[in-house]
Image: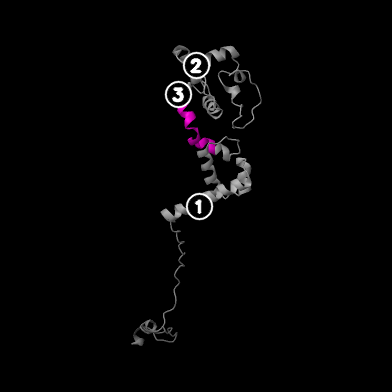
């Protein structure tokens, strides 16, 4: 706790197991180290001191980061993230199975995230779906090229067995655009059924008019 309350380094933008960029935003930052130790490391049965520490943590904007820091670094003593040692015990035991999608998204945004086993599996599945190559995954996860290749192979087998079990949905057929109908001259029998047309003869200028025409 002493290193947190007196720590003052520029923000690194990283979120790994050694990340300390959140320290300066904590409510406890700037406290006297001895007061901080007395506040956040009370005796297990000192309920009044525990309540005072939790009240400070409730107003802290980086409470979640504080809890993650304690879990990833196996800090089982004291109050971290507003939780006591007994309240954090199930979190410590279940840490390998923790799945926080905000951390997965942060990983794909280029941040250095210390992933749990379950979070890493989600990352590998999404990396395979995005078409990542083994060399890119190896650099991102900081593992060997062979290990990254094996992880992508496992993800490919998982997709294959899923499609084999559930079936692959059929692709939608593209509709053919119908061409506008064009009028064509009638042929054959239809042409023969048309009534014959009689040409209209123009009236002669020498035709007599009136009674003389009768």
Q: Which mark is residue 157?
A: 1
Q: Nearer the viewer, residue 128 or 205?
A: 128
Label 2 belongs to which residue? 53
Q: Residues within 10 Å of mark 3 (few under 14, many from 20)?
A: few
Residue 149 visible:
yes
Which residues are drawn in magenta? 89-104
Mark 3–mark 2 CB contact (< 8 Å): no
Distance between mark 3 and mark 2 Cα atoms: 14 Å
User: Is residue 179 shown above or below 107?
Assistant: below
Q: Position of residue 18 (x, y in %)?
A: 61, 29
Of callouts 3 and 2, the N-terminal one: 2
Distance between mark 2 and mark 1 Cα atoms: 49 Å
Specify the quadrant of the image occupied by residue 207: bottom left
Judged by depth in the image, the label closer to the viewer, 2 or 1, is: 1
Instruction: Report whether 88 appears left or right of 22.
Output: left
Of callouts 3 and 1, the N-terminal one: 3
Q: Residues within 10 Å of mark 2 (few under 14, many from 20)?
A: many
Q: Nearer the viewer, residue 200 or 4?
A: 4
Q: Residue at x 54, y 42 (%)?
A: 123
Q: Residue at x 47, y 25 (%)?
A: 88
Q: Position of residue 158 (x, y in %)?
A: 49, 50
Residue 64 colored in magenta in the image: no
Judged by depth in the image, the label closer to the viewer, 3 or 2, is: 3
Of callouts 2 and 1, the N-terminal one: 2
Q: Nearer the viewer, residue 68 or 153?
A: 153
């Amino acid at each position: 706790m002493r290193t947190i309350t007196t720590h003052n380094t520029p923000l690194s933008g990283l979120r790994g197991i050694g990340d300390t960029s959140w320290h300066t935003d904590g409510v406890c930052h700037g406290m006297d180290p001895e007061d901080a130790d007395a506040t956040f490391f009370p005796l297990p049965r000192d309920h009044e001191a525990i309540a005072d520490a939790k009240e400070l943590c409730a107003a802290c904007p980086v409470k979640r980061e504080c809890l993650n820091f304690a879990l990833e670094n196996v800090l089982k003593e004291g109050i971290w993230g507003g939780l006591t040692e007994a309240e954090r015990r199930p979190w410590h035991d279940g840490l390998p199975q923790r799945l926080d999608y905000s951390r997965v998204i942060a990983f794909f945004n280029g941040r250095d995230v210390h992933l749990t086993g379950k979070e890493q599996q989600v990352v590998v599945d999404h990396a395979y779906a995005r078409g990542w190559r083994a060399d890119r995954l190896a650099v991102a996860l900081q593992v060997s090229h062979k290990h990254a290749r094996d992880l992508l192979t496992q993800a490919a087998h998982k997709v294959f067995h899923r499609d084999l079990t559930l079936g692959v949905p059929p692709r939608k057929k593209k509709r053919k655009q119908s061409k506008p109908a064009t009028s064509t001259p009638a042929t054959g029998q239809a042409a023969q059924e048309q009534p014959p047309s009689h040409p209209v003869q123009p009236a002669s200028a020498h035709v007599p008019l009136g009674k003389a025409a009768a």
